Structures are given as C-alpha cells and as structure tokens.
Amino acid sequence: MNAAPRARVQRRPVHGVLLLDKPLGLSSNQALQKAKWLLRAEKAGHTGTLDPLATGVLPLCFGAATKFSGLHLDADKTYRATLQLGVRTSTGDREGEVIERRPVPPITAELLESVRQRFLGRVTQIPPMHSALKKDGKPLYDYARAGVEVERSARDIVIHELNLALPPDGQAQTAIEMIVKCSKGTYIRTLGEDIGEALGCGGHLSALRRVATGPFDERQCITLEELTAIDEPARLACLRPPEALLDDHLPITLSPEEAGRFLSGLRRRGPWPDADRVAVHGEQPRALLGTAHVRAGELIPGRLLSPIELKQMLSLP
C-alpha cells in the first residue's frame, strides 16, 4: 500500500528575528531550516554560523530582516566553554582523534591569572583547519578531511574579557571553565588549545556554548522543542522586529513626504550629525524604512525595504 503524499507546506511572508537556542549536533543551517519550516517562512538566513558541537544564541532572520543580517556579523560574542586539559585532538574539540596526551601539572590560581593576562586584549590567531573559512573557494574543513594542511594567515582578534576557573575543591584538575567575550572571527577552539599550551599540557574543548551575541543573550532564546510545542500565532509572537538588529544605529524619523523620497533612493538633507550607522523610520505610519549613513547633513540610503515588504509588515497584527 502506497503511503499518502506528504502535504506541501504553504509558505508565506514572515518578517523578523527569532532568537534560537541552537541544540547540540545541528549545524546552523539545519537549525535555520527547521525554524523556517515551523514558521512557514518564504525567506530566511542566519547571522553567522555556530559549530554543530556548540549550543546557544543563534539569531535567525526572516524576510526583511535578512537585509540587515550581515550587520550582526561584526557583533561581539560571549562564550562559555570547558577546556579538557592534557589531551590534544585533531579538531581542537571532542569530535577529533586524540593526537597527544600529556600530564597535567599542578594548576594554581596564580598560574591561571598569569595565563589569563597573556590572552587579554588584541592577540593573533591562526584559523584552525577544521573551520568554514575558505581557501581558493573551498572551506578549510574540506582540505582537513582530505588530510591536506594549507597555509593560513594569522588574524588579529580582541579578547575583551576572559575568565578561567579551576574546578571545585576536591575535584581533579583536569578541566578549566572558560568564559570569553571576544570580537568577531575568534575561534574559541583555537583559544582553548593555545591556553592549554600556555599551561604546559595542551587541551581541547569538551563543551562550547554561545551565551550572548551583540545585544542578545541566552535568556531571550527559544529552543526548537519549545517552538514546535506552541501553535502558529505563538510562534509568530516570538519574532522580534527587524530593527532589533539595528540597536547600535542612530534613529532618524522622516515625514511621509521625505520617507517616500528616501525609499526611492534619494538623499535627504537635515540637521543630523555625521553617523556611520543610521536606522531610518517613517513617521506616519511608524515603520522601519532601512539603513543609511550621514555625511555633512546628508542622509545617504543604504539597505532599503521594498514597498511590498513595508506593506506586508504594516499589515501584520
């Protein structure tokens, strides 16, 4: 007996940002596709990948919000990680093959503080082979899986805050809990490996969680299980407006006449200070129009919403 054909999902315009608590084991794209299916959204994207072995804050963008997703790539991130000492792996995390075992020396609070100070501020990192960074159009992990090591340029990153904690009294000193606030492009696996080397024993990450990215933190997130368990109106109510991605932008509001010209791509003049990042709204009705920057009193359009997107967003409850 043939199985009944699976019902086709009727897609629809959905606009906004969903703060997802990405589960362990799923890639960022797999998590995105599941959320997109649950929302029946036509268009979706994310604001930068999170490793399958990492959990935590993953902002997902739908509809008009996808136009501003790239702006969030520059946001600082905060991670909580467990660094397993004395064991190095091929990937820098627990999924890799063990390539070296070394004894763990006595680790004191003084030693940890000395190492912590070494990694604070502006430091350089060599991206790991097991990463999505591309070389000649191919991600580095493709070369790594083929057993090929390619040359990678060191890059500057900034570690804004770093906390290294010993295990509770009475437990073996085989792991360190790390909390890291860092700039974009920081590889926490590489940082963990470097800290392990600085402690004289090497190490790898046994757990990794992103607890914050830009203005968003884990307390604001919803899991896929929670999203699945609620009805469709409740799922849509979880979405934040697209301007949630523009929290660090200078807000400027235009009259209806000026808003129409701005949406046509025309520059507008006004008593505004110079600003690199501007979020432009219409006055009547109140709605996000797009981004811009200001130079010498001139408002210069950046990414603009389309008339269709505006109409759809204004019609939402």
Image (cartoon, rainbow, N blue to C red):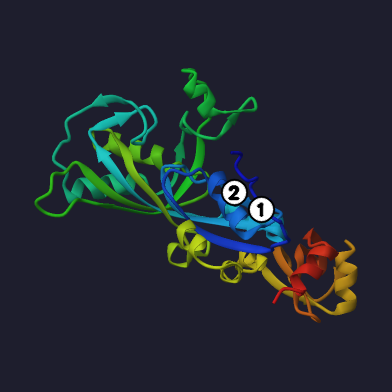
Is residue 53 at least partly visible in the picture? yes
Asked if residue 317 is positioned above or below residue 103 in the image, the reply reads below
Q: Is residue 22 left or right of residue 99?
A: right
Kind of residue sitting beneath label 1:
Ala
Q: Nearer the viewer, residue 259 or 34?
A: 34
Do the residues under discs 1 and 2 have CB atoms within 8 angstroms? yes
The residue under the point 57% across, 45% down is: 29
Q: Is residue 214 left or right of residue 313?
A: left
Kind of residue sitting beneath label 2:
Gln
Q: Which mark is residue 79?
A: none
SS under mark 2: helix
The residue under the point 74% across, 74% down is: 252
The residue at which mark 2 appears reads as 33
Which residue is outermost to the bottom?
284
Q: Position of residue 279 (x, y in %)?
A: 71, 68
The residue at which mark 1 appears reads as 44
Q: Nearer the viewer, residue 231 or 215?
A: 231
Neighbours of disc 2 within 10 Å: few (<14), some (14-19), many (20+): some
